[in-house]
Image (cartoon, rainbow, N blue to C red):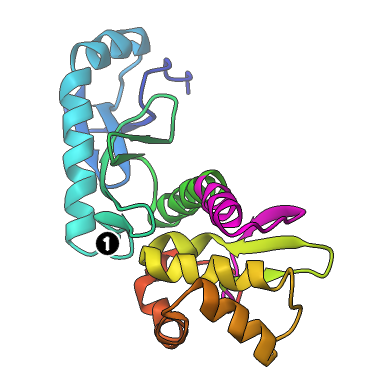
Amino acid sequence: MTQPPPFLYPYTIKRSPRVRRVHLAVSAEGLVVVVPERFCAFHDILPLLEAKKDWIAETLAKVRQCAIHRGQSKDVPSAVDLRALGERWSITSAPLARDRLLAESETITLTSDFNENEALAALRRWLREKAQKHLPLLLADAARRHRFAYLGVTIREQKGRWGSCSSSGSVSLNSRLLFLPPCLVEHVLLHELCHLREMNHSKAFYNLLASLDPSAEENAAELKHAWRFVPSWTSKGQAP
């Protein structure tokens, strides 16, 4: 069959003996152009799509939202709370010609032709980028205030640890720290920085930590239950 002409949004062509003219249909699978069984004027399709592009964009977005609310994409969140930064990002969808995820003005727009796994993967990439931008700044600020010097910082997606510090002076931080309240994030940062002077969990280490964080005991106890702040979509589909 002749290749369909390119258009702003992906679409498929379906022949049907029950239609006499070109018909557009939008579902959770995307845009379908239904044509008569003997249709051959494919050059007429593109002008029709261009004329209807506003309707197509609006309808694709609505269908995507309905799919989420019906539970077809139950793991795609409607909002993301980054407590560490005091930010709440709402999530919507729309047909995006180039960017698959657009984040601006505390709104995340996912392309409406994503399936659930693709949407969650895009959100995890966005979270990792946010963490790589903000967590090193928070660590640098804490180190400056308390006169610590560290070699470097890496951002990881750990499932059991909030952070670590190597004997060489490099600090590793969990990207999911962004979901925690600021007081707990500060506690984790100070905990790892204290290891630069006390590479153990001795009494000297805890005395140093307490001198920097007066609520160290309370924060440490709260940190044991802090995974409740982390949404399940951050690890869905990842290897255990």
Residue closest to the eye, 24 or 222: 222
Out of 145 and 79, give the one closest to the viewer: 145
Q: Is residue 236 visible?
A: no
Q: Residue at x 24, y 46 (%)?
A: 64
Q: Residue at x 49, y 71 (%)?
A: 187
Amino acid type at circle 1 is Gln
Q: Residue at x 19, y 11 (%)?
A: 51
Q: In the displayed orientation, state which residue is furthest to the bottom.
A: 203
Q: Quadrant of residue 97?
A: top left
194 left or right, relative to 180? right
The x and y percentages for residue 24 are: 20, 28
Residue 72 image position (x, y, % from top left): 27, 61
Residue 66 higher or lower than 206, as above or below: above
Residue 71 in the figure: left or right of residue 157 = left
130 over 22 or under it: above or below: below
Image x and y of residue 141, in percent: 54, 50
Q: Is residue 33 visible in the rendered structure shown here?
A: yes
User: What is the crowding at mark 1: few (fewer than 14 residues within 10 Å), some, or many (at least 20)?
Assistant: some
Q: Is residue 113 left or right of residue 167?
A: left
Which residue is farthest right? 168
Relative height, residue 125 to residue 215 (above, below):
above
Q: Helix, strand or loop at disc 1?
A: loop
**Label 1 belongs to which residue?**
72
* Numbered range of the magenta stretch: 134-161
Q: Report the quarter where the C terminus lies.
A: bottom right
4 and 173: which one is in front?
A: 173
Does 106 appear in magenta? no
Question: How many marks do you count on the picture?
Answer: 1
Q: Quadrant of residue 93?
A: top left
- Name the spot of residue 156 as percent of width and height, x first: 63, 60
